[in-house]
Image (cartoon, coloured by chain):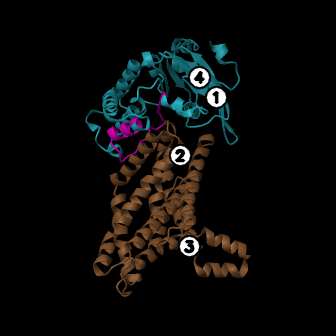
Chain colours: A cyan, B brown
Amino acid sequence: MLVADHLTKDFGPRRAVDDVSFTLERGEVLGFLGPNGAGKTTTMRMLAGALEADEGRASIAGHDCVAARLEAQARLGYLPEGAPAYPAMSPRDFVAFSLRARGFSGDSLKRAATLALERANLGGYEHQPIGTLSKGYKRRAALAAAIAHDPQVLILDEPTDGLDPNQKDGVRQLIRDMAPDKAIIISTHILEEVPAVCSRAIVIARGRLLFDGSPRELAELAPERQIEAAFRQLTLAPAGDGNTPEAAA
Amino acid sequence: MIHTLWAIYRRELGAYFLTPLAYVFLAVFGFAAPAFAFHVGRFFDTNRADLAPMFDYLPWLLVILMPALAMRAWAEERDRGTLEFLMALPIPLWATAGGKFLAAWTMAALAIALTFPMWIAVNYLGEPDNAAIATAYLGTLLLAGAYLAVGQALSATTANQVVAFVLGAGAAFLLTMAGLPFVLSVLGASAPAAVTEFVAGLSALDHYNAFRNGVIGLADLVYFLGLIGICLTMGGALVSERRGGGR
């Protein structure tokens, strides 16, 4: 469903993403883990067609994210880092804009927008300008726009950042509900989220993929059998110490 | 793919009216255009039933006000981070650039239409050549479009709307000045004739004046539509460059 094939991206002299490859199938929820500046967001932007790779390629449902960008993006729902949205628009208008850009109109647009706003739990705030909403509601408005067209692939960059514990739980439940018929990537700093929603985890640091496996396999890397400890062990280790995906798997 | 252009157009036009921008812009234009005609153009003193005093000064009003409309086109998207959201939608870049431009052009058309009391006044006071007035309005709309397109292209170079405005107004000013007799005479004294001719040909004012005099010339139409097309493409290319480039 989603393929990242030797993705590499440089920003000036700095290599942000270094030869990252993985594939994702329908029904999988992939936790994309790594410290700040590891290259998570850059990788997600390349998968979303918002940034072009210097080397390697990405595809969604068989459509190349650069050569057939529009076809790939039509099958993708993307929540960018920081959940950007137009502050003067209401969540309903924002979702409607996203749907209209994807060819929805009339009743089908109205139905899809209503369903997405319900699923993202916007409550009574769907007609209020996004700029006046709290961080959590703003994020949920952007999330509603990402899921409204029922995409085959979802890429969510820190979907629970800034949410209160109840809201976090709501978003996790939403991801679990959508999981069976989609391929989903979520990036997160919150490691407790990984066993709660992810069927698979990837750890990336300094632009390189260090681990690709199930959350349980990740936990088992550490003597304490805890994901936090395994994460620290992987990401704090000096580069090139043998913790390659092959070694970890 | 036309639905994508429509989606962007609707959003952009709505965005003007969701904030005070549209109302402030329309009020300023609706007030300033007649004020120029009355006070600077001495509308009543000409004793002629035409809108020449207004059309003489409209380009200078457009030099300031069109960049104010265009400055947000790309700069605001970059500043707010919504450019990434836009880039991840299945919308071709031409539709994004075109939708943004058409929305701003619609605002300009609304503002220009607000000068209609002047047109009613000259028709009340005398018998003006309404065909010539319509042609001059068409020229004004095309000139506004050219300034908007230039402003939109420059808006793609920065995430700061004030910088985008200053660049846009500067470029529109130069584009207008290029055709003034004193600029051409200064240039004619020091530069080869071919350069002077080239600069005169670039002048938006020259092409606007043809319309103002009631003539729709093919060369003038091509100039304005070509300039709009080139600038929108340049703006789109600058944004597209970011997709391939860094942050």
Question: For the residue labelled by badge 3, is the local secondary structure a helix, a strand or a loop?
Answer: helix
Q: Is residue A120 left or right of residue A179?
A: left
- Report x, y in % for residue A89: 35, 45
Residue that numbered label 2 is attached to: B94
Question: What stretch of residues is rendered in magenta?
Answer: A75-99
Label 4 SS: strand
Query: Nearer the viewer's eye, disc 3 or disc 1?
Result: 3
Which residue position is annotated with label 3?
Answer: B206
* Amino acid at dot 3: Asp
Count of all numbered marks drawn on residues in the image:
4
Residue topped by disc 4:
A3
Residue type pointed to by label 2? Trp
Q: Mark 1 near mark 4, Cβ–Cβ under 8 Å? A: yes
Nearer the observer: mark 4 or 2; the answer is 2
| Discs 3, 2: same chain | yes
Cα distance between the residues tagged 3 and 2: 29 Å
Measured along the vertical axis of the image, is residue A32 above or below residue B207? above
